[in-house]
Amino acid sequence: MLVGVYNRSKDCFETIAKIGTGLSDKEWQEQKKMCDRLMVPTKPKHVVCAKELTPDVWVNPEIICLIRADEITLSPLHSAGATKTDNGFALRFPRLMGYRPDKSAKDATTVREVERLYEDQYNKKKQKKKTSKKVKGQKSIF
């Protein structure tokens, strides 16, 4: 399943992950039924997707999913936040956790929110590295 985030400034949906885990067989069958109702013959105009990521079937972006991932990485394929000079963002080890039927597609996570999460994640890793370096002469109390 190809998933994306909303780019408010471009009014389009950009890909961020392909998901194949997180659901039971029964839940995948329910997912297929939802997708069958939203199926369209060609890629929706307001979806940005690399040809290498083209799914077998296109659906209108109306299903809001809850996704859990290990981290956000840079991707040469995914279009979320990509520019002519910068890679897009991707979710590393994404898992489908559920749905948000109370939300509309434009209420989904935005590219800007993903950018902020990526920056926060990078800054936390940077801080963790700084604090894990032992200062000369410093004794460990653990």
Image: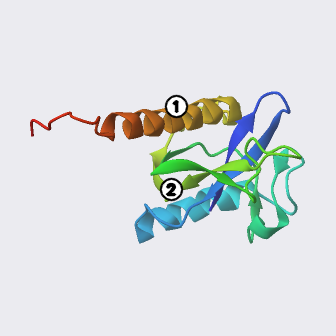
- Left or right placement of residue 122 versus residue 56 in this view: left
Q: In x, y percent, where is residue 3?
A: 65, 53
Q: In x, y percent, where is residue 135?
A: 29, 34
Q: Residue furthest left?
A: 142
Instruction: Please state which amino acid type lies under the numbered disc 2.
Output: Pro
- Left or right placement of residue 21 versus residue 89 in this view: left
Label 2: which secondary element: loop
Q: Nearer the viewer, mark 2 or mark 1?
A: 1
Q: Is residue 2 above or below residue 60?
A: below
Q: CA distance from mark 2 to mark 1?
A: 18 Å
Tell me what residue is drawn at x 78 percent, y 66 percent. 54
Q: Is tag 2's residue or tag 1's residue first in the polypeptide sequence?
A: 2
In this view, the residue in front, 131 or 118, is 131
Q: In x, y percent, where is residue 12?
A: 82, 39
Instruction: Please indicate, yes or no, whether residue 88 appears anywhere in the rendered image.
Output: yes
Residue occupied by mark 1: 120
In this view, the residue in front, 128 or 80, is 128
Instruction: Please state which amino acid type lies under the numbered disc 1.
Output: Asp
Residue occupied by mark 2: 94
Q: Residues within 10 Å of mark 2 (few under 14, many from 20)?
A: many
Label 1: which secondary element: helix
